[in-house]
Image (cartoon, rainbow, N blue to C red):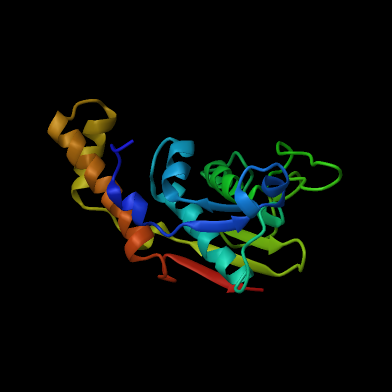
Amino acid sequence: MDDYPKWFDDVEPIRLYDGLSEVLGTFKDGIIEIKYLPIVQMAGHSCPTVAGAYLMTLRALKVLYPDTLPVRGDIMVSFKEASSEGVAGVIASVISNITGATDITGFKGLGGKYSRIGLMNFNSDIDASARFERVDTGKMVDVYYNHGSIPGDPRMQELMPKVVDDLATDEEKKLFGELWQERVRKILIENCDNDQVCKVVEL
């Protein structure tokens, strides 16, 4: 597992507590550390959308849980779009894997506890990229993500049609991939705290 951009390992991980994980003996004390690489493996690729979903979750949970670990399965997430609209489904899938939140497809619970369903909503009356809410306290944050504030290398515009139409040389394909991931790296590493890229607003 060495054939991936090494900067993936430098992305700040997300640590959470998962009571179900503790009960079932999955992780010691129920502590889970989620890194960017497994999220990429789940999604099958690394792009500004996948990176944005990860970054929005990281930033939102820091504000929602300033003094304690976020509780997986106790976080509600809402989107203004339908799940089939644009990239909402991709973003929702990433956030679901981190927070455990699902709409109707998740774990239904164990002994009346640890249910994951009903924690993800679409077509919500919000104007943010996503809204995160603590179920226990009701504290909410809106998160606004704008990957357009980090433009890609101009060479990508020329290379993309060639890559998509399978007309690019091996060297051009390699360069395109490197330039693509460099933009993602700038989002997650250089601009992880940049409010122009990802802004969290407490409600």
The part of the image, by quadrant, that contains residue 107 is top right
Residue 79 can be seen in this image: no
Whether residue 128 is situated above or below residue 3 in the rendered picture: below
Front-most of 73 and 94?
A: 73
Drawn side of residue 54 relative to residue 135, left or right? left
Residue located at (67% from left, 46% from top): 21
Which quarter of the image is occupied by the N terminus?
Answer: top left
Residue located at (38% from left, 58% from top): 188
The part of the image, by quadrant, that contains residue 135 is bottom right
Q: Position of residue 88 (x, y in %)?
A: 56, 46
Residue located at (71% from left, 47% from top): 20
Which quarter of the image is occupied by the C terminus?
Answer: bottom right
The count of marks equals 0
Q: Position of residue 38 (x, y in %)?
A: 46, 42
Drawn side of residue 157 relative to residue 102, left or right? left
Q: Position of residue 52 (x, y in %)?
A: 46, 54
Whether residue 190 is situated above or below residue 73 in the rendered picture: below
Whether residue 9 is situated above or below residue 24 in the rendered picture: below
Front-most of 12 and 143?
A: 12
